[in-house]
Image: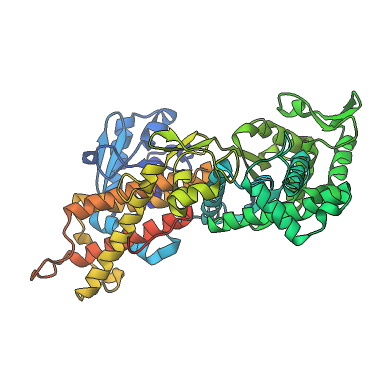
Amino acid sequence: MTPAALAELVRSTAVDVLTARGLDTAVLPAQVTVERPRNPEHGDYATNLVMQVAKKLGVNPRELATELSTALTASDAIDSAEVAGPGFVNLRLAADATAGLVRAVLTAGEAYGRGTSLTGRKINLEFVSANPTGPIHLGGTRWAAVGDALGRVLSAQDADVTREYYFNDAGAQIDRFVKSLVAAAKGEPAPEDGYGGEYIAEIAAQVLAVEPKALEQVDAERDETFRKVGVNLMFEQIKKSLHEFGTDFDVYFHENSLHRSGAVGTAVEALKAKGSLYEKDGAWWLRSSDYGDDKDRVVIKSDGAPAYIAGDIAYFQDKRARGFDLCIYMLGADHHGYIARLKAAAAAAGDDPATVEVLIGQLVSLVREGKPVRMSKRAGNVVTMDDVVDAIGVDATRYAMIRASADSTLDIDLDTWSKRTSDNPVFYVQYAHARLSSLGRSAAELGIELGDVAEADLSLLTHEREGDLIRTLGEFPRVLASAAELREPHRVARYLEGLAGAYHRFYDACRILPRGDEEVSAVAVPRLHLCAATRQVLANGLALLGVSAPERM
């Protein structure tokens, strides 16, 4: 029995109890909460349902809790139900109900944990979107890991998710990039406001390899050549790094297309027609302060050029026109002002601001031997995705970036994440999976046949550590649902560490395979089924993080 099934049992039983007493069942919450007590001696699960509704019903909470407990024990799934404190109900599951969860995991396989809370939602998830002016830095690396994991978690709740990269191929940063390439091609120092690092010289050389006479062209034609070829080369490097990191996108949306197609102009004129823009000092301003922003924003500058927000407005409207009912933007630490700005832009266009969500990722730092890691020679002034992957590998980098809440700053100790010990969180989880895989191979070598889990006597799984492990497996669907609802994939990583810990404690306390000439015990096969279920959940969780589940380490 999963916690969700138990919660439904508690609610349906409460409906029966209230109905029998002639009390209003409408006070019951749509979803009842059942939680694992901190002290295992208090039972397998506990619920505070009675405490939530007793005052509204005008009844004594302990009296109502006693009636609910008595009614619950009539279920074959409940071994005992006891009233605690002012009206809490502590529950112990029957052995068959507990063991049934093992069957549920193995029957569902890769689908175990998935839900339907987002069925019918069409979500545009935009993340990374680094400017094509240099390699992906640590902030972009964090979003590459977290964004990809979030997309997987949302999909696991049956959402239709499109992963999108906003390709910033317009604006002043591209002009500076082009000037830097031209200077490098000429053998000159980078412009004062340009980009440094060896990658600039590498791309400049590649541009000349493609267009050998580029430097002989007149300035405007030369700059356009370096822009067209150089930006494309840089972006191909970015996509290659992302792909090798395990992050791919469904759509690469070009900012320039909004300007070339006239979408920006159309969006601006529509806002003017609605009265959402006003003219002041020769510029056109969005009345964003009317919709929750801290101030109004310039959309068309006094020289007639569109401000950056003009593209943002057209881009959001393009997403909505493509049928997305939720647009999630994952932006860097310096973009906090975009939350109110984008919501205001949606509201000003007559749309629902709730269709916009903005997640802000905080800064990442690398340390080694307690000291900050030096800047990358290749990138000039930043540490890149490729640098950290070279140092600790893809799996460790992804896991390290994901396991902490994205809205908190993050220090990654390269020494810790390089270790092959339990101090390294990703090794700890992956080792549990490898250990379980090895156990399955050893059982097969001993000729132990598991058979159909439906026929196994799982009621033999009565050890305290077995119960703890089974209940931990049961938490997985709820963890995934919470991770999707709160947009927090780090919850999956922390859960996996807890599951690995529960397994290691079980393994240390419960003998599974015979030693020497010992006979195979009656509980060996049920325990092997429990191990297979644990391995499955670890694999499912790691897959949602985009981290491998090795069978040998």
462 up-or-down from 336: above or below: below
Q: Quadrant of residue 520?
A: bottom left
Check the picture and name the quadrant holding the C terminus.
bottom left
Quarter that holds the N terminus: bottom left
Residue displayed at 28% across by 37% down: 38
Give how far across and how far down residue 7 sits, in percent: 39, 47
The residue sitting at 36% across, 46% down in the picture is 425
Name the colour scheme.
rainbow
Q: Look at 44% across and 53% down and name the residue there.
A: 395
Q: Is residue 452 left or right of residue 318?
A: left
Between 194 and 149, the one lying in front of the other is 194
- Which residue is at the far bottom? 447
Q: Check the image and name the residue furthest to the front.
A: 187
Res 476 seen here: yes
Q: Is residue 233 left or right of residue 515?
A: right
Determine the residue positioned at 58% across, 55% down.
Answer: 241
Query: Where is 341 relative to 119, above or below?
Result: above
User: Residue 95, position in %: x, y?
Assistant: 23, 56
Residue 197 in the image: x percent, y percent? Answer: 63, 43
Residue situated in front as seen by the camera: 386 or 471: 386
